[in-house]
C-alpha cells in the first residue's frame, strides 16, 4: 500500500468558500476512484491535508496522471502559499522510492503549466518537487 500525503496553507486572500469547494474535490470524491480523506491539518504549520490510499505503484501512477487530478492541481495550486507532499509505503520493493519519484518527474515533464505553478509557490517540499530526488 502507498499512502500519498499532501499538506498545504492557502494564501490569506483566498475566500473560505473557494477553499471549501476545492477541498470537497481533493480525495477523488468527484470521480470515486481513490479512497482517502481531506480536511484541516492540526499539529504543524499547515492548514489543510489530504491522504490517498493507493494499492500499488501502477495505481499510484494512474492516480497521479488522472485528468481529474491535474484539473484539481491547476485550479488549486494558484491558491496555495506553502505545499508539502510525501509518501509512506509498506511495499518491500527497494526501488519503490525511485519509482515514485519517476512518476512525478514524468508528470511534471508532461505538464509544463503544472511545473510552473509549483515553481511559483512560496514553498514546495517533498520528493515530488520538480528537480528533486527521493530521500
Image (cartoon, rainbow, N blue to C red):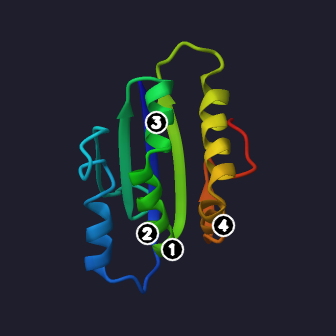
Q: Residue at x 64, y 15 (%)?
A: 94
* Tally of numbered tags: 4
Q: CA distance from mark 4 to mark 3?
A: 22 Å
Question: Residue most toward the right?
Answer: 131
Q: CA distance from mark 4 to mark 2?
A: 13 Å
Per the image, label 1 sits on a secondary structure element best described as helix
Contact (CB < 8 A) between labels 1 and 2? yes
With 56 as the anchor, is 100 left or right in this view? right
Up the image or down, 18 lies above or below 13; here it is above
Q: Quadrant of the C terminus?
A: top right
Q: Residue at x 75, y 50 (%)?
A: 131
Question: To which residue does mark 1 refer?
Answer: 78
Q: CA distance from mark 3 to mark 2?
A: 20 Å
- Local packing at callout 3 (Cα closer than 10 Å; few below 14, some 14-19, many 20+) is some
Q: Nearer the viewer, mark 4 or mark 3?
A: 3
Per the image, label 2 sits on a secondary structure element best described as helix
Task: Residue 12: give x, y in percent of width and height.
Answer: 43, 82
Contact (CB < 8 A) between labels 4 and 2? no
Question: To which residue does mark 2 refer?
Answer: 75
Asked where in the image residue 102 lies, by quadrant, the reply is top right
Q: Nearer the viewer, mark 1 or mark 3?
A: 3
Q: Pick whichever of labels 1 and 3 is earlier in the sequence.
A: 3
Question: To which residue does mark 3 refer?
Answer: 62
- Local packing at callout 4 (Cα closer than 10 Å; few below 14, some 14-19, many 20+) is few
Asked where in the image residue 7 lies, by quadrant, the reply is bottom left
Q: Pick whichever of labels 4 and 2 is earlier in the sequence.
A: 2
Q: Pick whichever of labels 4 and 3 is earlier in the sequence.
A: 3
Q: Nearer the viewer, mark 1 or mark 2?
A: 2
Q: Residue at x 50, y 25 (%)?
A: 57
Per the image, label 3 sits on a secondary structure element best described as helix
Question: To which residue does mark 4 refer?
Answer: 116
Amino acid at each position: 500500500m502507498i499512502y500519498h500525503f499532501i499538506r498545504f496553507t492557502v494564501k490569506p486572500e483566498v475566500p473560505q468558500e473557494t477553499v471549501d469547494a476545492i477541498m470537497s474535490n481533493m480525495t477523488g470524491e468527484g470521480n470515486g476512484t481513490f479512497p482517502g480523506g481531506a480536511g484541516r491539518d492540526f499539529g504543524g504549520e499547515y492548514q489543510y491535508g489530504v491522504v490517498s490510499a493507493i494499492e500499488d505503484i501502477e495505481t499510484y501512477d494512474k492516480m497521479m496522471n488522472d485528468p481529474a487530478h491535474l484539473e484539481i492541481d491547476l485550479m488549486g495550486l494558484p491558491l496555495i502559499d506553502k505545499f508539502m507532499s510525501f509518501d509512506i509505503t509498506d511495499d518491500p520493493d527497494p526501488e519503490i522510492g525511485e519509482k515514485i519519484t519517476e512518476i512525478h518527474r514524468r508528470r511534471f515533464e508532461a505538464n509544463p503549466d503544472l511545473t510552473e505553478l509549483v515553481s511559483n509557490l512560496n514553498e514546495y517540499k517533498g520528493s515530488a518537487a520538480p528537480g528533486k530526488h527521493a530521500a
